[in-house]
Image (spheres, helix red, strand yellow):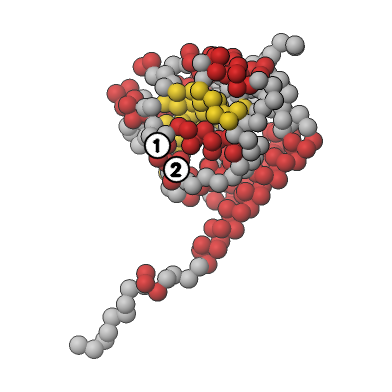
């Protein structure tokens, strides 16, 4: 197997750039420049990792072990690590269990379907961190990912996206980078919100995730979460993280079918949510919501 290449970790200057921000509605302020409140760690607990995995046998043991060893502020660690075996045929589930994870089986193929199964198993409180099962996520970045959720000054973020500012071709293929850039540009244009990446390494509070009523079972999952979070007025933060070349064969960039399927899923989700917003704006106000007219007679 050729040696894996790790993308350059963002510098301290990059970490305080405008790429990383906390957003509520349409306002933005730097997230990393704000202090982390270590005394508020209890608000994140239980901390749960959800790792969707389809045929990730070469990597899943390493990913679970890294998640078990990961520590955030003040020693905060994962209380549960859930690997969702998305109809694998290579023994992914057995390897995940051997490494110390809880496993859930989801027969429906699709990234969103696996995430939904993991959420159902996670319970109704705490914080969920989504981690890819291919070892492309560097869990040394867990403290940075969770820091905005502990911020007293800006208000604790409810959703944090790990953005990938400097991916190399070994970590993200050209179609992935172009599709990601086009999708985020389209979201910024249509909703006027500062979205810069659809990165899968993300953290969200369970109650906020439940409020989004997620539906997509395939590639539109990540974009559905981000757009719905902005529409709901959530505080959303972006934090630059490192990205590594995955272990094993990519199901998206590794095939023409995967690239086309991902593009259709992402852009159709953007279109559906935009059309839904237009319908909502055009819908007449219910008569019961209109205050009665005041009479001019006395």
Q: CA distance from mark 1 to mark 2?
A: 8 Å
The residue depicted at 54 percent of the width and 25 percent of the height is 103
Give residue 123's position: percent from left, percent from top.
Answer: 42, 34
The residue where tag 1 is placed is 124
Q: Quadrant of the N terminus?
A: top right
Above or below for 211 versus 120: below
Crowdedness of circle 1 by 10 Å Cα count: few (<14), some, many (20+)? few
Residue indicated by mark 2: 210
Q: Position of residue 139 (x, y in %)?
A: 52, 19
Badge number at residue 218: none
Query: Foreground: 33 or 52?
Result: 52
Residue shown at 48% from the left, 33% from the top: 121
Residue 187 in the image, given as x and y percentages of width and height: 59, 47
Q: Are marks 1 and 2 in contact (CB under 8 Å)?
A: yes
Q: Is residue 47 left or right of residue 104?
A: left
Within 10 angstroms of label 2, few (less than 14), some, or many (20 or more) residues?
few
Q: Earlier in the sequence, mark 1 or mark 2?
A: 1
- x then y, percent, for residue 25: 44, 47
Q: Residue furthest bottom?
A: 297
* Quarter assignment of residue 292: bottom left
Q: Quadrant of the C terminus?
A: bottom left
Assign a secondary structure to mark 1. loop
Nearer to the camera, 269 or 230: 269
Give 177 or 33, whichever is nearer the viewer: 177
């Amino acid at each position: 197997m050729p040696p894996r290449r790790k993308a350059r970790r963002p510098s301290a200057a990059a970490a305080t750039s405008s790429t990383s921000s906390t957003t509520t509605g349409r306002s933005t302020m730097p997230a990393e420049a704000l202090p982390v409140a270590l005394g508020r760690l209890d608000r994140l607990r239980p901390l749960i990792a959800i790792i969707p995995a389809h045929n990730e046998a070469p990597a899943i043991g390493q990913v679970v072990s890294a998640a078990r060893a990961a520590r955030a502020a003040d020693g905060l660690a994962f209380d549960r690590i859930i690997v969702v075996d998305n109809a694998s045929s290579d023994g992914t589930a057995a390897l995940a269990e051997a490494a110390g994870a809880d496993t859930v089986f989801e027969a429906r193929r699709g990234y969103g379907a696996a995430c939904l199964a993991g959420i159902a198993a996670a319970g109704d409180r705490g914080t969920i961190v989504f981690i890819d099962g291919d070892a492309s996520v560097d869990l040394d970045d867990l403290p940075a990912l969770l820091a905005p959720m502990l911020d007293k000054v800006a208000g604790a973020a409810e959703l944090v996206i790990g953005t990938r500012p400097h991916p190399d071709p070994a970590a993200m293929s050209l179609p992935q980078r172009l599709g990601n850039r086009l999708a985020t540009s389209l979201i910024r244009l249509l909703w006027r919100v500062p979205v810069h990446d659809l990165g899968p390494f993300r953290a969200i509070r369970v109650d906020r995730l439940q409020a989004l009523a997620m539906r997509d079972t395939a590639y539109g999952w990540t974009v559905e979460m981000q757009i719905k979070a902005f529409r709901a007025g959530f505080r959303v933060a972006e934090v630059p993280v490192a990205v590594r070349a995955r272990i094993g064969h990519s199901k998206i960039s590794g095939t023409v079918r995967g690239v086309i399927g991902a593009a259709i899923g992402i852009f159709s989700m953007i279109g559906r949510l935009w059309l839904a917003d237009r319908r909502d704006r055009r819908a007449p106000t219910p008569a019961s919501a209109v205050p009665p007219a005041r009479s001019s007679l006395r």
